[in-house]
Amino acid sequence: MSLKLYIGNYNYSSWSLRPWLILRKAELLFETEMIYLDVPGYKDKLLALTDAGTVPVLEINGDRLPNSFAIAEFCAKAVPNLWPKDKADKAEARRVTKLMHEGFEHIRREAPMNLRRRTDTKMPQSCLNDAAAMVELWDELLSRHDGPYLFNDWTIADAFYTPAATRFESYGLPRTNRSDTYISELMSDPDFQDWEAKAFTETQTMLETDKTNL
Ligand SMILES: N[C@@H](CCC(=O)N[C@@H](CS)C(=O)NCC(=O)O)C(=O)O
């Protein structure tokens, strides 16, 4: 099987980071191709890939699949241990992954992933509310499954929350001790660190994202 993952900027593209981590954990061999976002002509390049006009896109033997959740499901079919083994846990892992995929809109909008960023700016209350709800969700799952990951072993759910964990670091969002340990676990993951190192050497910037909440 030949796989190529089209991604956006390492520093900013939270949606690209998720399937990239999953493909790494699945030990599936894949190439990557970067499409820098917010540069002249970038949208045409995205639309030439798929009608979605977004990254990530996974090319599978020449066919192109957009959407991070769909790509995660494709990987899980190829490598079953990416979801928890237990049926009830698997259903819950899919639910909380969907929640990250579709919900927490304030934290996504007001605290965009920006791996190079560290600020102590006061964040809007709506963003703090989302952060508190996320911490509550993490704490409940971590205590029930006895960590270090949400369902004990690493799963797709942890891939989906990794970019969120980076936002807690970038924007100094409040968290409990248990969630702080979880954030450190995700951010010290060798695959994440490999991605982060590329973000730190990347020179392309997205000025609007860098300006958010300055
Ligand atoms: N729901 C989509 C969201 C993908 C998305 O919005 N990706 C951003 C980059 S992180 C994008 O391609 N934006 C295109 C644009 O800004 O025009 C997914 O899960 O893949």
Image: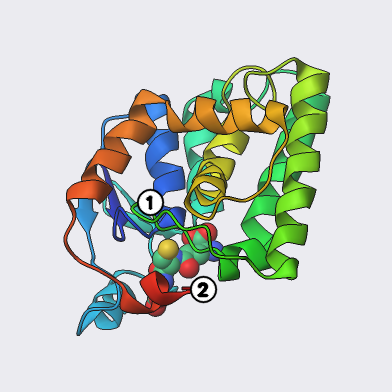
Image quarter for residue 111? bottom right
Marking on residue 213: 2
Return the x and y of residue 203 as percentages of the image width and height: 16, 61
Q: Looking at the picture, which amino acid does disc 2 mark?
A: Asn
Residue 51 visible within the image = no
The structure residue drawn at horizontal position 25% and vertical position 78%, both measured from the top left corner, is: 42
The reply, left or right, for residue 40 in relation to residue 54 is left
Judged from the image, the quadrant occupied by ligand 1 is bottom left
The reply to whether the residue tagged 2 has its Cβ within 8 angstroms of ligand 1 is no
- First in sequence: mark 1 vs mark 2: 1
The reply, left or right, for residue 184 in relation to residue 31 is right
Q: Looking at the picture, which amino acid does disc 1 mark?
A: Leu
> Is 214 or 6 nearer to us in this picture?
214
Within 10 angstroms of label 1, few (less than 14), some, or many (20 or more) residues? many
Disc number lying in front (1 or 2): 2
Return the x and y of residue 157 as percentages of the image width and height: 62, 37
> Is 119 or 168 nearer to us in this picture?
119
- Disc 1 versus disc 2: distance between alpha carbons? 15 Å
Residue at the spot of label 1: 115
> Is 195 or 114 nearer to us in this picture?
114
Residue 197 visible within the image = yes
7 in relation to 82, above or below = below
The reply, left or right, for residue 44 in relation to residue 185 is left
Quadrant occupied by the N terminus: top left
Secondary structure of the residue carrying numbered label 1: loop
Return the x and y of residue 121 as percentages of the image width and height: 54, 64
36 in relation to 19, above or below = below
165 in relation to 211, above or below = above
